[in-house]
Amino acid sequence: MSAKFQRIKGFADLYGESLGIFSQMEDKAREIFPRYAFKEIRVPILEFTDLFQRSIGTETDVVEKEMFTFPDRKGRMLTMRPEATAGVMRASIEAGLAQPGTISRLYTIGPMFRYERPQKGRMRQFHQINCECLGSASPYADAELILMLLEFLASLGLVGLRLKINSLGCRECRPEYMRKLREFLGSLDVDKLCVDCARRMAVNPMRVLDCKQEGCAELAANAPRLLENICSDCQRHHEKIMELLAAENVPVEIDHHLVRGLDYYSRTTFEVVSGDIGAQTAVAGGGRYDGLIAQLGGADVPGVGFACGMERLALLMKAQRPARLDFYMVAIENDGLDKAFLLAENLRKAGLSGEINYGGAGFKSLMRQASKSGAAFCLILGSDEIKDGEITIKNMDTGEQWRAPQSAVAPKLKEALEQ
Ligand code: HAM
């Protein structure tokens, strides 16, 4: 017998419940983003390697260690996109969507590829829902984008998420901050930093600020703070965003060490994090990238955007809303099956989820199936219930049961589900 094929490490097949959750996320994105005037764009998975080097930065972990890069048959270097922003910028420049005086709001959904060590919430092929707003330098654009992201996350029923924000300054004030940061890092005992940070100190010193290694975090705690060193224009930009978010009662945490792992950011950076998905806490991240489009050969058009990691959102959705049917309908054949069938159909139209048996089993066996289905409630339609125009609702967790009129089963069940 020949050996079975296996999927590549860090790559996953999507089907069943997981695929259902992904589809649900995509549906919500397609429902919510257009309300904010965002339109869909789809860009290729393969791009010339240069594009990522020039946008993400050659000294980032993504470009240095994580890209799937290979030559095509003519020896040109191609890369499977590690993120969507660079490709969306390239496409916007080519399509004339990144023009001074025009605002283009674009979203894209699809697979990304990074050669990282796979673990819970970290894959080599993962999926992002990515939004970019091109053409405005206004803090209203940042605030609106963040509010749209939070609206999207709330629509997935997610709770307990925290929004973190920082500002990285602009081309005017960053050089002076970098001078101060280098001076500070130069005063540290390099031996106490991790190997990566010892190297980063020279090539990408801001990354030392968000190193998760305990020793580095301790040393970086006293580093000069970006928000205390940026210019007054950057300050005003940041404060306006904070004011707009406060007006919407959005809790925000300032994170002085939120510098992000990609080099194109200027001014605003933000992340949404969760404590419920293990070590990989960021479910979404983004920020402003005012010089990027010009750097890629386009006009000097500003932009701001974010991406959510769908695998991480799916983990959260599974953890926070264990997939559970609302009801299992038990009907005895010939007695109540027709009636139960129609009732179950009405319940689904009312937004409830449930399973029904198709007859051919006794009461005891049906109750066993009800319990095996994991449904929250069992609905029983026996001859007594039919005679009285009622139905029995049984709470499968507590065993408690009561009767309700068949005409009111949807509101009664919803009420019970909310308790
Ligand atoms: P990023 O922070 O590199 O930003 O990725 C965004 C999100 O993608 C992360 O918060 C995480 O949820 C998810 N993610 C990243 N790597 C993996 C992985 N290996 N496995 C699973 N999920 C992962 C960007 O990609 C920027 N392009 C975001 C952006 C758009 N900034 C401006 N516009």
Image: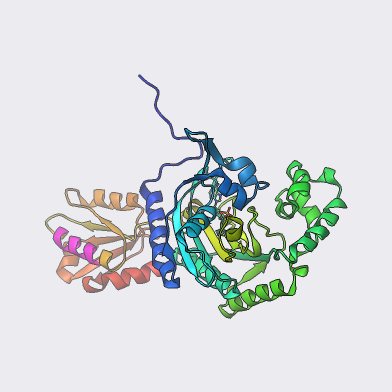
Q: Is residue 251 left or right of residue 367?
A: right
Residue farthest to the left?
334
Q: Seen in the image, is 317 located left or right of residue 411?
A: right
For residue 121, say whether it is visible. Answer: no
Q: Residue furthest top?
A: 1
* Relative depth, front residue between 371 and 355: 355
Residue 18 falls left or right of residue 193:
left
Q: Give the residue drawn at x 83%, y 53%.
A: 185
Tell me which colouring the rendered structure shows: rainbow
Q: Quadrant of the C terminus?
A: bottom left
Viewer-closest of 102 and 327: 102
Vertical order, 317 against 411 (above or below): above
Q: Is residue 181 above or below residue 12?
A: below
On the image, which quarter does residue 393 sit in? bottom left
What type of secondary structure mainly makes up the magenta span?
helix
- Quadrant containing the N terminus in the rendered view: top left
Residue 250, image x and y in percent? Answer: 58, 73
State the residue in front, 92 or 316: 92
Q: In the figure, 122 relative to 1: above or below? A: below
Residue at the spot 55% in from the left edge and 78% down from the top edge: 248
Q: Can you tell which quarter of the image residue 160 is in?
A: bottom right
Give the camera-side residue of 279 and 267: 267
